[in-house]
Amino acid sequence: MKYNHIFYIIFTIAFASCKSPEARKPITVSTGSFIDESVARNKVLNQEQIKKIENIIAKNPDKEYINSGNGFWYYYNTKIESDSLSTPNFGDIVNFNYDVRHLNNDTIYSKKEIKTQNYAMDQEEIFTGLREGLKLLKEGETATFLFPSQKAYGYYGDEHKIGINTPIICEVTINKITQN
């Protein structure tokens, strides 16, 4: 009988240990409050930058600023009134020059520093505002763009001369568009 009792205990332990493990409930539950706070901060930051840009526009009534509809403003320094020229399309190679300045017009990168660029439209990395701005220009045109930081180098800057959340001005000239 002693052996039956031991057999029963061993059988019970073995049977109980075959039970599948139960999943533990998470200790913390994410509420998304950090993301909500970040979105709210970014909205305030963007509105502050837009106000600065609008002040620049108001102080320069001689320039005909255009709201791009994509979150930035620009005016033409040189506009080509020709129907025979078109703006670049996907895959076209755009040869262009540009500079980068602070909103107070202090130079960050000159055209000489940046040098002439060749860009395959929408197929290479380039900051959002510049990519969208190039699509607005024809060969031979020059425009000055005012970009809030979200359309420029954003939260990280360029890790060299452009700081975090820095709105910028760029004067861009398209030298040549090679259709692909």
Image: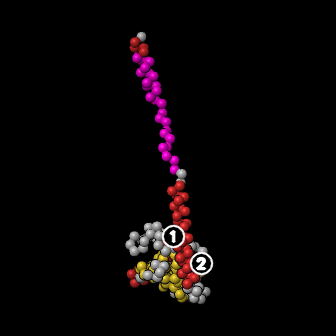
Q: Residues within 10 Å of mark 2 (few under 14, many from 20)?
A: few
Span of residues in magenta: 6-30
Cβ–Cβ below 8 Å for labels 2 and 1? no
117 in the magenta segment: no
Task: Identify which residue is drawn at 52% across, 58% down.
Answer: 35
Q: Residue 46, which numbered label?
A: none
According to the image, label 2 marks what residue?
67
Give coordinates of residue 80: x percent, y percent: 57, 88
Query: How far apart, in angstroms, are the residues tagged by discs 2 and 1?
Result: 16 Å
> Relative to 80, does residue 169 appear above or below in the rendering?
above
Q: Is residue 73 visible?
A: no
Q: Residue at x 59, y 81 (%)?
A: 66
Q: SS for tag 2?
A: strand
Q: Earlier in the sequence, mark 2 or mark 1?
A: 2
Q: Identify the amino acid type marked 1.
A: Gln
Tell me the quarter of the image containing the N terminus: top left
Q: Nearer the viewer, residue 86 or 7?
A: 7
Residue placed farthest to the top in the image? Answer: 1
Which amino acid, mark 2? Answer: Asn
Q: Quadrant of residue 12?
A: top left
Q: Is residue 15 magenta?
A: yes
